[in-house]
Amino acid sequence: MSTPRPYKRIATEEGWATPEMMQMYGKVLESRTLQDPGFYSLWGFFGQSQSPRARDLYERIQDTGARRLADMDACGIDMQLLLLTSPGVQIFDAPTATALAISTNDHLAATIRQHPTRFAGLAAVAPQAPQAAAKELERAVQQLGLKGVVINSHTQGEYLDDEKFWDIFAAAEALDVPVYLHPNTPSPQMVEPFLSRCLDAAIYGFAAETGLHVMRLIVSGVFDRFPRLKFVLGHLGEGLPYWLYRMDFMHAGIVRSNRSEGVRPLRKKPSDYLRENFYYTTSGMPWEPAIRFVQEQMGHDRVMYAMDYPYQYVADEVAAMDGMALSDEHKKMFFQTNAETIFKL
Ligand code: MN
């Protein structure tokens, strides 16, 4: 008999979707009414392709019962934090997206009530209606017990550094829950050069898009306005931890040069916000040297395990993460207690 593990494994960026939303994605794919080439590239593959991998993902993403639990058991995941898959409700018009976020959050809360030890979740909101989004976040946290909010990067080419979205940040800060900024394909303004080489999604485009989004947020001064606002980034921070030195050096010069009204002096260095307002998950990046680097730079209390189910469902990765050269204390923080603290599980 094997000794019981001294930690629970909580996976913190696990995708799901409702059949209702998948049907609505199908209609968009048929009607071609959305002006977002990245969406057609991503969901044309998952939704309409006959490849076995695409069909399999399409089924797994919608399962919040027996099949998902069996997959979790098969690789030793005790709990999944569920995030509505990208781009969530953000492609629809504001009234449709607002209504869909509400029904999706109700569906998620019902799923969690059935398996409260196996699932927790983040709320979906429609940033295209910021006040309604703030209200729905409040309802989702206070009445449904959801643990924060997921936003899938750009909303129809718009970024959250625009002050019109900041009611959402005010609500998240007041509720003391994190905003998980999850990737989307690059916005319509920047996706073109990614498409012909199939670089628009997880291979690179997600990180380019989401990293840009984070940099826009930081230099806009959003974290001076909301100093207790907490963000979570997947994929070990979308490459940004590697840039800390250069972003500080260059940002100081841009501020000194007075080059643009879009760049105001900040209270701290850009890297300080990444160290103080951000948390990081390992979704899709189960690679020890990179994980160790982010732990060393950001702190062991800021890095959490995530698998990125069902897109990167690889049982061997869990064993590799178990085998990392970390102290027992740090390993328990990585797999379990950081997630419990940050998401109040
Ligand atoms: Mn993901």
Image (cartoon, grey):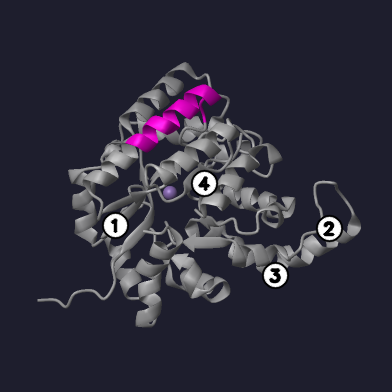
| Distance in Å between CA atoms under marks 4 and 1 | 22 Å
* Residue 345 horizontal/vertical position (percent): 36, 59
74 up-or-down from 189: above or below = below
Name the secondary structure under disc 1: strand
| Distance in Å between CA atoms under marks 1 and 2 | 44 Å
Q: Residue at x 30, y 64 (%)?
A: 9
Mark 1–mark 2 contact, CB under 8 Å?
Answer: no
Q: Disc 4 or 3, which lies upstream in sequence? A: 4
Image disc number at residue 254: 2
* Residue 131 horizontal/vertical position (percent): 59, 34
For disc 4, the marked residue is 183
In this image, 97 relative to 167: left or right?
Answer: left
Image disc number at residue 149: none
* Residue 296 horizontal/vertical position (percent): 53, 76
Q: Residue at x 38, y 63 (%)?
A: 340
For disc 1, the marked residue is 79
Q: Which residues make up the magenta segment?
A: 91-106
Tag 1: Cα neighbours inside 10 Å, few (<14), some, or many (≥20)? many
Q: Amino acid at mark 1?
A: Met
Q: Amino acid at mark 2?
A: Ile
